[in-house]
Amino acid sequence: MNPRFRQRFLRNRAGLFGLGVVLLILGMALLAPWLAPKDPSQQFFDGLTLEGKPLPPGGQFLLGTDTLGRDLLSRLIWGARASMLVGLVANGAAVLIGMLVGASAGYFGGWIGGLLMRFTDVMMAFPALLLAIALAAILKPSLWIVALVIALVNWVQVARVIYAQTLTLAQKEYVEAARALGAGNRRILLRHLLPHLFPTLVVYGSLGLSTTVLLEAALSFLGVGVQPPTPSWGGIINESQSYFTDAPWLVAFPGLAILVTSLAFNLLGDALREALDPTLR
Amino acid sequence: MTLFVLRRLIGGLPTLVLVTLLVFALTRVLPGDPALLLLGEEATPELVAKLRDELGLNRPLYVQYASWAASLLHGDFGRSLRDHAPVGPILWQKLPTTLELSFFALLIALLLGIPAGVVAALRRGSAADAGVTVVALSGISVPNFFLGILLVYLFSIRLGWIPPSGYVEPWVDLRKNLLLMLLPAFTLGTALAGAIARFTRNSMLEVLSQDYVRTARAKGLAGPVVVYKHALRNAAIPVVTVIGLQLGGLLGGAVITEQVFSIPGFGRLVVDSVFNRDFPVLQAVVLFSALAVFLVNVLVDLLYAAIDPRIRYG
């Protein structure tokens, strides 16, 4: 890693805060089975009041219970797992597709490039959420399908940025020199172009995760995302939306979880971008 | 000008054809036999075969696409699977509501985002700049259904100022319509406001460091004249681009906002059609939205010329 880059990144307090929160949430997702105080899908007999209402935060159930008497804290911790799993898989796939499409269009140009970028333009015209809803409705939603759907609508931006970068990179003299030395397309793309595209990919890997987490939450909130009984943050809000006057914690905690996660990835992505290109600040 | 619009629209034709192809593929190529879905639990092999024949599903795919595209050109969006009502009129009925919501959301986003971005750029590095940056980023990061529910909790349930949900047509009761639109429009506009504020700030910072701004200041022009006449106008181009790009997001956000506030618009139609497995409706809404985004981006191109007279289309 470029030491100047590291130095600039370490000076950015907001970015470090973002990184810390991201690591915390990732840890929560990884260690969910050990961290969660209770079984997230068990309906506790003493998890509801005598009138059958959810319990407020405090006591045995630290963040209260949901409408079925399940422990909210445990559901939130397991929800981090769904959120991160979908986020990492979906965004990883989106960045990969975007990179492949953008780099091949920019490097090969010609009719292949034209066709690929035209297709990218078409995808730009579709509102991502609408398309994701339609896809999720047609395919039966499962954790993997949700990730796939999000990847399918989210690669477009990466493709555009990578395309523009590859276009300029491909004209550079060192690429010409490599070709003159007999390097094939594969070698030029992997050894000479990819390292230069890598920083952009890292930035979008982080910023895109924020979008992905929000999209997963929105789909689950609408009921076409992660399906119960798998706990997800958007799903918890969906289940308890109509009770929120009686049990505001059921909306507040998962909502805050989504907000903090998305914000952390945004802060991290911004800091990475600024560290890579200090003229931005 | 007219020539440019025409050329731009014709240039967009291949894109539009691809859009229709994609929407068509969305419901035909992916798993799930429409006839089977249509019949539901009563499906017997004979009935399915008969219906497939009636729906023309046995014809080659390109014939199916051609006949679907031809009926689109006639303004025929097909019939709802649920009650066999034509989809076109349903769309036209819901459209104004979503347009109104999106318009107010955009208005709020502009009114909040642009001044915030300008202030942040002018006082770069100040507490105000930091504040704008944090608030804008939070606006982008907050899930809008969460924000919507919070607003309802605060303004409707706690304070009792605004009814929590519902919709009244503006021609029935304009005052009530506007009052009911306030929270949804704010909910929908927040993310866009955040994005606009960030882009305005960066764009302004870049413009403010240009020589002509220094010249204008050196000439002794008043601060506000320099900021608004020289800087903001030049900074507006990237901001307008962002607005054009974010419009698809606005339509997507409308789906969620309408769900939270029970507004009977496009978004509700989408969610209902998903749960009823009403694919013709879903198909039409997706197609319509893509069309809208395309047209708005043509409009954005025209706006460039209005903002910056150096850009001419001929």
Image (cartoon, helix red, strand yellow):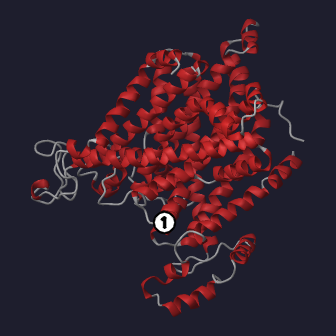
Residue underneath mark 1 = A139
B212 is higher (above) or lower (below) than B110: above
Q: On the rendered structure, is B22 left or right of A270?
A: right
Quarter where residue B87 is shown: bottom right
Please tell me whether residue B234 is drawn above or below residue A100 in the rendered image: above
Q: Is residue B295 above or below residue A136?
A: above
Q: How many marks?
A: 1
Q: Mark 1 falls within which chain?
A: A
Q: Residue at x 50, y 20 (%)?
A: B129
* In this rendering, position of residue B268 left or right of residue B306: left
Question: Residue B46 location in percent, x, y?
Answer: 52, 93
Asked whether residue B283 appears in the rendered view, the answer is yes
* Residue A114 coordinates in the image, percent (x, y): 76, 48
- Residue B135 visible to an observer of this rendering: no
Q: Is residue A227 left or right of residue B124?
A: left
**Residue B56: % across, % down:** 65, 83
Q: Quadrant of residue A178?
A: top right
Residue B197, how many percent across, how many down? 56, 30
Task: Estimate how packed mark 1 is, as few (under 14), some (14 to 19) or many (20 or more) residues with alpha carbons within 10 Å.
Answer: some
Question: Disc 1 residue type?
Answer: Leu
The residue at the point 20 percent across, 43 percent down is: A34
